Amino acid sequence: MRKSGWSVSPSPFLLTHPTISRMSLVIGLTLLPHIILLAVERNFTALSVIALSVAGSMLAELCIAFPSGKNKFGDGTAILAGILSGLLLPVTIHPLLVFLATFTGMLAARVLFGGPGSYWMNPVATVVSIVYISQASSFPPFLINADGVQTVGDAFGALRLDHFSQLSNDHTITASLNTFLLNFFGIKLPEGYITLFWNSPSPIPAFRYNIITLASSVLLIAMNIIDWIIPLFFLFSYGLSVWIFSLLPFGTGFFTGDILFALLTSGVLFVAFYVLPDYTTTPRTQAGKAISGIIAGIIAFMLCGPGGSPVGAAFTIVIANTVNPLIEYIENRHIATQGFKHEYAHKV
Amino acid sequence: MMRFIKFKRSFELIKFDAPPIHLAGNAFLPSTAIVPLLQHYGTPSVPVVVQGDRVKEGQLIARGTGMNSAHIHAPIPGIVREFRILPLPDAKKGLAAIIQLAGSFDILGRKEENFSWRFMAESEILRVLEEKGVVNTFEHAVPLAASMRSARNSGSPVLALRLFDSDPTCQLDSFLARNQLQTVLEGAAVLAKGLDAEKIYLLHDDNKWTGPDDSGLEEIFQKRKVSLLKVGKRYPSGNTRQVCALIREKKTVLIDPVTAISAFDAVIRNQPVIHRFVAVTGPALDSPAILKVRIGTPIGDIIEECGGFRTDPTRIVINGLLAGNAVYDLDTPVTKYTKSIHIMDNDTCPSYTVRDCIHCGRCLQVCPVSIDPMRLASAIRKEKLTGEQIKSCTLCQFCGCCAIVCPSRIPLHQIIRESCERRKGDIK
């Protein structure tokens, strides 16, 4: 008998999606520029926060995997969750708290909230929430205050009042963009937004490099690594809410909010593409995902307001994740009837 | 050439490389034929020869034992060396007769017969189909004569001929429908007569029917009513459940081009089923081709005839990449239900590890019958199936769409199929 050395597995032999390990790897690679830029800026405190967070996450994974005897590091999700948590924590936090909070948060989210693969609370958001509840003072305050907004009449103007330091080439880039691109559409970009895109002034690393987050999101959606429905509906509903209502309490009326400022200052973009679409915590149908995204957007508006919130985005995930099981419950009931409708259609 | 397959319920695409494939004629005769005694769903045939017997080409070597068993014939002349349990293309093991080539040929090289079937009685056609061991390979291989008798006895039977592959990567049925349409249609006409079919449906997936016109079809099918039905190209398409839903006739016998050609050979050429057309392709194969292969030929011999491996193969897949089986032994023989052999390399078919479900919902979004494969498989694993879930198992078409899109690589449809087979009694 001529034996071969190749493997035998059940069908199918053509697959359309990358494996979980590959998905984790690609997401990890898109986070690499954030880490490189932190290293270039010599922000070693932020790097040590990330390292401790990864260590805490891996230890938690080891504790979960040990009783079952399964190797859980193979798919890279523990490392990825550690990096994401580290990027969402402020650099001013005590290192021991980072490690303990990540370890506890990961363990709690994965064990108490349903076990590996079926937990309904996002571990990264859980970690940030634990840290905030334990040491709220380590988080920066809101970027803008009510007095500032009332004085100037817009959110970004209020930030400028508060010693906002622009990048040295912000003026040049803004002028070029206005002259060569935006002029054709009748739009004029005020100075300072380039700084918010490229290096937003925040002690939380994930909030800083919005342009990298945006570029990465294109790659992740194009490669079918993340679902586009949830981020799209989330950003749309949050943006719309900000535009319509955000400055209403300050007497400037409806439709005066600054969407760009809101998206670039609260870590909303980062959370929208890296944390919110976590498959484990979201509904499974496209309609369910859309509803979840819209609800998350509304929650984000309630917590972050016109922008500049340090933890609003993370708490948005926590609250949205408590709503998602309800959406999924309705979704499951709908699915159960769908199959039998199909059967009926065949019999007619 | 890169081809794309669309899902029925999703905009995602299955991408696969389909190099141009041509009919390369008869394959070399095997020096040793491995003839399994079970080449269809049902019970194995009982050998009528013993070790050391000399057999002629096309001689009966194992007799079917009932309704769900078909006769087996010697594909080559020779000496029965032994009976041995060997791996089969359906990933199971079974008893096979090992025949060593010796002696002269009674079919090969002789003038082909051309029997006038139009004057045969219906029962005579069924008897010939049974005698020649014809099996229906539409979905799972089953003895053809028995299923035709059953349909006939229930009155007003209908014949449906699918002229494309239910697994598009298989390519054989589409090839035969394109290149041997006359033989396929005549074989179907023989079966329509044997069935005394009221109506014949020709299912095709081309934008425009390129076969014989109405008068031509009328002549082939002896004035029986023939309907052309265009079926969508999205996967899955053309399986039993879908065709039955499309036709909405109660007693339908569904056949594919391979079965029609077998019927043509049995009734018109007076030949038992001793060979099969097999599409041999894949990125790790040197020269893809379609060969007319003797049953019992080891797949290793066929690969060798197609130039051998171009690169290191990772998997050898029988009967399509979406719904087929992987084999590990080059001595696995070609059987009556073998349609294609794919030799896959590491780039197109890498090894993977099955992980825990991540709850992405892709299986749900792609399922053509709107069941929930993830929850169903999870309930099966926990042995906590509800009555509703047991019922939804029966809706599954086992097309594998859920497993194709699964990033955790969970063989969802296989889990559901296995549970269905185990619980058949409960479902009834």
Image (cartoon, rainbow, N blue to C red):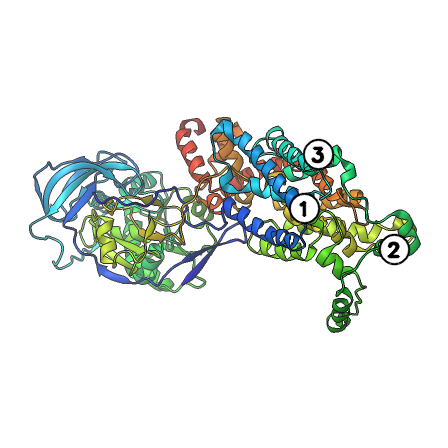
Tell me the quarter of the image containing the C terminus of chain B. Answer: top left
Question: Quick one: label 3 or label 2, which is nearer the N terminus?
Answer: 3
Residue at image coords 19%, 44%: B34
Residue B360: x and y, percent?
57, 42
Instruction: Mark 2 vs mark 1: give the one in front.
Output: 1
Question: In this figure, which residue is indicated by the disc labeled 1?
Answer: A46
Instruction: Say which amino acid is labelled 3.
Output: Ile
Quadrant into which the N terminus of chain B falls: bottom left
Circle 1 packing at 10 Å, graded few (<14), some (14-19), many (20+), is: many
Q: Give the residue type that dot 1 points to.
A: Ala
Q: Going from the N terminus, do you reach mark 2 or mark 1 first? A: 1
Establish whether labels 2 and 1 are both on one chain: yes
Q: Is residue B76 left or right of residue A286?
A: left
The residue under label 3 is A130
Q: Residues within 10 Å of mark 2 (few under 14, many from 20)?
A: few
Task: Please state the chain letter of the residue tagged with numbered disc 2 in the rendered image.
Answer: A
The nearer-to-camera label among 1 and 3 is 1
Residue contact between numbered discs 1 and 3, judged by CB atoms under 8 Å:
no
**Mark 1 belongs to which subunit?**
A
Residue annotated with mark 2? A161
> Is residue B144 visible to us here?
yes
Q: Is residue B261 above or below residue B409?
A: below
* Point 13% across, 38% down: residue: B82
Disc 3 residue crowd, few under 14, some 14–19, many 20+, Cα 10 Å: some
Residue A277, position as x, y percentages in the image = 63, 45
| Amino acid at pointer 2 | Leu
Q: Nearer the viewer, residue A298 or A174?
A: A174
> Looking at the image, which residue is at 55% across and 46% down?
A24
